[in-house]
Amino acid sequence: MVVLSSSPALKKSAIFSGVPEISLSEPGSDSLLVRACEDLGFFKVTDHGIPMELIAKLEEEALKFFASSESEKELFGRANPFGYGSKCIGSNGDVGWVEYLLMTVTSEPLSMAFLMQPSASSFRFALNEYILAVRKLACQILELMAQGLGIEQTDVLSKLVMDEESDSMLRLNHYPPCLMLREQNGFLTGFGEHTDPQIISLLRSNNTAGLEISLRDGSWVSVLPDQEAFFVNVGDSLQVLTNGKFRSVRHRVLANGWKSRLSMIYFAGPPPGERLAPLPEVMEEGEQSQYREFTWREYKSCAYKTLLGDNRLDLFHKRGDD
Ligand code: GA4
């Protein structure tokens, strides 16, 4: 069993009021998205078109799952990396005050044995509906980004996610309450600091704080929850595809022990064999790529050998060759 530190050392960061809020139904959202990706690598979208009932249904099913017994949850299969995990994140020793379900998402509906049980049919249904809706939203956002970057072929990014072989994932994270933390009025790492390796991640959480992002000066700020919006992170792959113009955002989650936090994150990734290199359309005349050439398969396999906080993209930076 993994024992987390009993003396919470973390302090909560100041609330940040500068998270860009972008309504997808307003004209001009494409350039606002681009600016947010350049400045913070993080923003939230409203008027996203995903019905609240669909989100609430998955939230209800997920909470039901996390409230079931450990032995029932383990029937999902232990995370390796896909499946049910508790306190251990990845395979290299990271721990956090979190339990989760990590699922690989293809163009086919989810069909793992656990979800095919008749008793799990409403969970499966809610997951599949949610995945369809959130993938569509990810593509809409990627198309707006391409448009904002002045790229004529606006599906240049979204087609990577729509590809039948796209390597995308869905993660449900549950940060349970914790009596000890509550008594000490402290905070524990729920999910340690990291950047997401994929193209973009769309996060929806319940109304519980905990998410923090790192600003350009390295300081940490706390993001106010908004259960009706989707928070979007630029991932490492999009940083590479834009030759560093967009910033892959470092983020973490702190658990406070009082209220359980539930988040559902869709990680939009490219197909394994996709070459990750700056899009010619974003390069100025004479501009050189900042990165060595690699495929998503190579990058992912390297990322999964690292610890959460490692700066894994540095290993692919041309500066690393000096
Ligand atoms: C971070 C983003 C996604 O949650 C994830 C994570 C993955 C895992 O939980 O297995 C990793 C982490 C994430 C990056 C570094 C490695 C792999 C845990 C870890 C220590 C599913 C992903 O794709 O990369």
Image (spheres, grey):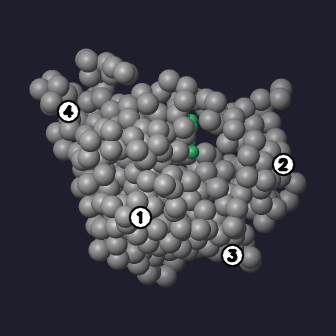
Specify whether residue 40 is in view: no
- At x 78%, y 32%, the residue is 319
Q: Which numbered circle lies on residue 288?
A: 2
- Label 1 residue SS: helix
**Which of the two discs, 2 and 1, labels the residue nearer the N terminus?**
1
- At x 26%, y 46%, the residue is 68
Q: Residue 52 or 315: which is nearer the viewer?
A: 52
Image x and y of residue 41, in percent: 53, 52
**Residue 96 relative to residue 31: left or right:** left
**Which of the two discs, 3 and 2, labels the residue nearer the N terminus?**
3
Amino acid residing under circle 3: Thr
Q: Nearer the viewer, mark 2 or mark 4?
A: 4
Q: Which numbered circle lies on residue 124?
A: 1
Give me the C-alpha separation between circle 3 and circle 4: 46 Å
Q: Nearer the viewer, mark 1 or mark 3?
A: 1
Q: Is residue 185 above or below residue 132?
A: above
Q: Nearer the viewer, mark 3 or mark 2?
A: 3
Residue that extends furthest to the right in the rendered view of this protein: 286
Amino acid residing under circle 2: Gln
Amino acid residing under circle 1: Arg
Q: In terms of image quadrants, where is residue 274?
A: bottom right
Pointer 2 local density, CA inside 10 Å: few below 14, some 14–19, many at least 20? few
The quadrant of the image that shows the C terminus is top right
**Which of the two discs, 2 and 4, labels the residue nearer the N terminus?**
4
Give me the C-alpha separation between circle 2 and circle 1: 46 Å
Amino acid residing under circle 4: Cys
Give me the C-alpha separation between circle 3 and circle 2: 23 Å
Image x and y of residue 250, in percent: 50, 41
- Label 4 residue SS: loop
The residue labelled by disc 4 is 178
The residue labelled by disc 3 is 154
